[in-house]
Amino acid sequence: MQIALFTIFGLLAIAGALNLLLQRHPIHSALSLIVVMMSLAVLYWSLGAEFLAAAQVIVYSGAIMVLFVFVIMLLNAGEEEHTRGSRVAAIAGFPGAAAIFCLLSFVFLSERHTFGATRLGESVNGVGSNILQISHVLFTSLLLPFEVTSILILVAILGAVVLARKEL
Amino acid sequence: MVPIAYYLVLAGVLFCIGIAAFLMKRNIITIFMSIELMLNAVNLTFVAFAHMWHQVSGQIFVFFVMVVAAAEAAVGLAIIIALFRVRQTLNVDQVNLLKN
């Protein structure tokens, strides 16, 4: 059953990513990126990361992509036009990306026996829920980095407000 | 039973589509979205390795990546809005002040 789940949502993610690449209008690209993120959330869940699956839906598809859609509609972005730069980028981009993909998949598939396999619904350590373990590590040994991220978010809010002001 | 290598290959596919979109797209918002796609692909490898080693460290790493991606999206989109006010365009070929 898990291989079926992986195949369906993996193909959905790849189709969404290809649609992002092929669509000309930014709003279509944004909506297909949401499809990619939702199917990745299902894959996280199948890997035993329920907390991250929920956070992926809430943070990525919920917050970040809504921000993207807001900005696209605010700036009234139309279809992108083909320029000389886009032809050069297409000639350089496709072989480069294909070469990186060949290298990555060669490494992953040649080492596939050392990686092992997954079972559905298996929690990471076998004891307790996933959220329990994450929160235990996050609020004991990683408390300082966790608090620093709140300062990072605060600085990002201030930076966004300053940058998007009327007079810069 | 799905081999971990399949998840890694899927992440590689998504990452390479992100690279291709980053290089080929001319709209600055779409380029920014392809960066988010690459971040998501790397997150998938982190979760797969966390599952493989039976440790939550990889998942906590993904949590921090999500936090930084949220902050990055807010600042980056504010920069795009400021850029659009000044240049009235979203095409990266016309934003070449440092090139000339």
Image (spheres, rainbow, N blue to C red):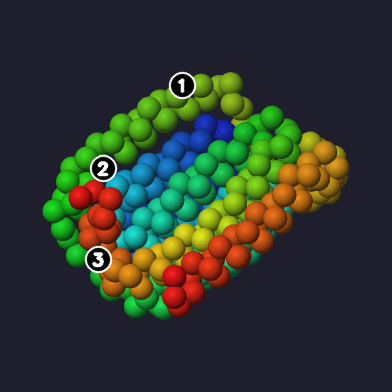
Sequence-wise, the earlier of marks 2 and 3 is 3
Residue at the spot of label 3: A80
Marked residue chain, label 1: A
2 and 3 marks on the same chain? yes
Q: Position of residue B82 (x, y in %)?
A: 41, 68
For label 1, the SS is helix
Sequence-wise, the earlier of marks 2 and 1 is 2
Q: Amino acid at mark 1?
A: Ser
Residue sitting nearer the eye, A28 or A110:
A28
Q: Position of residue B46 (x, y in %)?
A: 60, 39
Q: Quadrant of residue B67?
A: bottom right
Residue A62 position (above or below residue A89) = below
Residue sitting nearer the eye, A166 or A147:
A166
Q: Amino acid at mark 3?
A: Glu
Instruction: Give the Cα separation between the discs numbered 2 and 1.
Output: 26 Å
Residue at image location 66% in from the left, 61% down from the top = A154
Sequence-wise, the earlier of marks 1 and 3 is 3
Residue at image location 52% in from the left, 42% down from the top = B42
